[in-house]
Amino acid sequence: MPALSLPLPRARAWRRSPLWRKAGLRLALLLLLCAAGAFLAEQLAHQDTLTRARSETAEQLGDLRVALERALSSDVQRVRGLVAYTRDNPELDQAEFAQLAQYLLSDSEGAIRNLALARDLVISHVYPLAGNERALGLDYRRNEVQWPLVEQAIRQNDITVAGPLELVQGGIGVIARFPIFLPVIGPSDPPERGPLWGVASMAIDFPALLERVDLPRFQKDVTIVFYGRDGTGRAGAPFLGDPEALAERPVALEVQLASGSWIIEGTPHGGWPGHSDYLWEIVVAATAVLLVGLGLIAWNLRFETRLVDAAAALEQAREEAETARRTAEQANRAKTLFLSNMSHELRTPLNAIIGFTEIMEQGTFGQIGNPRYRAYVSDIYRSSRHLFELINDILDISRIESGDVAVRDGEIELDKAIGGAVHLLGSRVAEKRIALSTEIAEPAPRLRGDATLVRQVLVNIVGNALKYTPAGGAVEIAAGLAPDGAVVVRVTDSGPGIQPHLVHKALEPFVQLNRAHDVAHEGTGLGLPIAKRLMEAHGGRLSILPREPAAGGRDGSGGTSIVLEFPAERTLPAAAAVSALPGAAD
């Protein structure tokens, strides 16, 4: 008993000491901090989750908008061809019209219901006639539904898009109309508009249009509502979808038509997320912080003096860690938002620029009269393609660095893969008059890997060799099996070579090495880094073997060799027959 009497006064003294009150206050403060920190972290994480959800929804609606605009634009252009022909041949009969319409619709994708001509504003020609008989004889001036937009097209002398509406021949469709004015005989200043011949129209089956752009695929995750019948945009009423099903603050995008626009709004099914994707992680982290805090408080009761400094240091470290975490999260969100915006805002208009300049360069709708303009169009097309490739390289390296690369294994015939890469780069070979040769062991090696990624590696490596090889030089491609069974591909060029101490820099992103003062190159310096990371994703290796040029000129000893080594476990048994290498050049 005497032994037990000693701790009791100490216990009473501890209970009466200010340390217990401090511990209580600290415990209360710890609970408050954990709750507030968890709440703040959840708010920030929820905002990030909401931002990503809106970005993903906007990306899906953007893809739908591009698909709709592309489909409608390609179909509406057919009306212009019909108008031009009718102006020159105003007396065409049904047989001639049917032949012309059949030609205009020969490469359509099935969404066009019919083409029609309304001479004197009464439909007189229809193709195909089967299923559209009821449209013949329709007098636009007596149709209260269609006449206002027909009158608008005549008044403005431009295409108008009506619908979706119920067609006279049955079904729901979108109608594009273009007035036809006969040419004026003789010169006039200013140019005068001739007499009105009638109206050319095209009916696009609306359900088929939605199936063509694969609307159900977008509706799997997003509730979508269309506004703006007859191209009235935001002022128009909804014509597809239920506005009541949309959550608050829907994402809205404008679909540009030949005249006017539609508005598409969308929100995820079930509305926007009510909490962050990291809710349970935050709860676990807050609980862990609470437990650590309890331990610190208990330790503080015994070692008050020593713990003051330690607690201050720990608090500072915690604040720095929290600041670093928030900074990293903000940087990651900024990067994600930047890549998303760049993908949508840059690639979408670039696709349009590339497509339209290619059409103008090829003269699909007629040749450009001035040769200088044709040269300008060619320059725009090449520059747009170059910018598109640069953006793709930046997106590729960002996706690779984030770990978003999945290798989908399949059987790859190496000779065909190399031949495909050579074929894609054939224009560069011809432009620089490069002697390109291939030497592939027989039978041709076969390996297990992702055909798309391996092709990208080969295109990057061979393209890099062609880029640094001067005009009239040579590039050699050799492939075979190493003694251990690994598949090895070697690409050797006759360029100026790389100094050995700069080899490691060539594999760093956004680094370009000028291998000679008289050679200028374009690009981002991402070809080799992307190829290196794709090889590593296959468990392989990319090596650069520099070869210093001999003094006194090009004697074959200069240039660079890039070696691709796939691991032996990816080698497949060779096929029984060896096919010729497609696209190979001497």
Image (cartoon, rainbow, N blue to C red):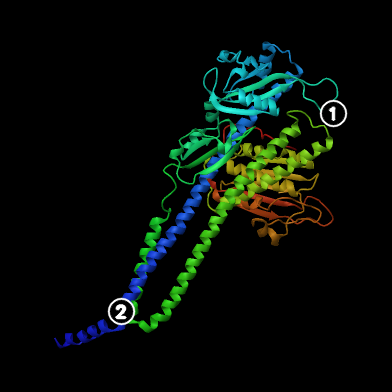
Q: Earlier in the sequence, mark 2 or mark 1?
A: 2
Viewed as shown, does residue 220 lie left or right of 487? left
- Across and down, in percent, residue 285 comes to 39, 62
Residue 169 located left or right of residue 551:
left
Residue 189: image tag: 1
Helix, strand or loop under label 1: loop
> Which labelled disc corresponds to residue 491?
none
The picture places residue 278, in percent across and down from the top left corner, at 42, 55
**Spatial separation of the CA atoms under disc 2 and disc 1:** 98 Å
Give the residue type at disc 1: Asp
Q: Is residue 197 visible?
A: yes
Q: Which residue is mark 2?
A: 21
- Dividing the picture into quadrants, the one containing residue 585 is top right
In percent of the image, x 63 and y 44: which residue is there? Answer: 347
Q: Is residue 245 left or right of residue 454?
A: left
Q: Quadrant of residue 133?
A: top right
Taking 283 as reference, is 142 left or right?
right
Q: Residue at x 66, y 33 (%)?
A: 580
Disc 2 residue type? Answer: Arg
Q: Is residue 488 visible?
A: no
Task: Give SS at disc 2.
Answer: helix
Q: Nearer the viewer, residue 179 or 344?
A: 179
- Where is 59 relative to 315, above or below? above
Residue 385: x, y in percent?
70, 42
Tell which of 397 and 209 is nearer to you. Answer: 209
Q: Which residue corresponds to the image point at 56% horizontal and 37% vertical from the top-left? A: 235
Q: Residues within 10 Å of mark 1 (few under 14, many from 20)?
A: few
Q: Residues within 10 Å of mark 2 (few under 14, many from 20)?
A: few
**Residue 180 drawn at (x, y percent):** 71, 22
Q: Quadrant of residue 119?
A: top right
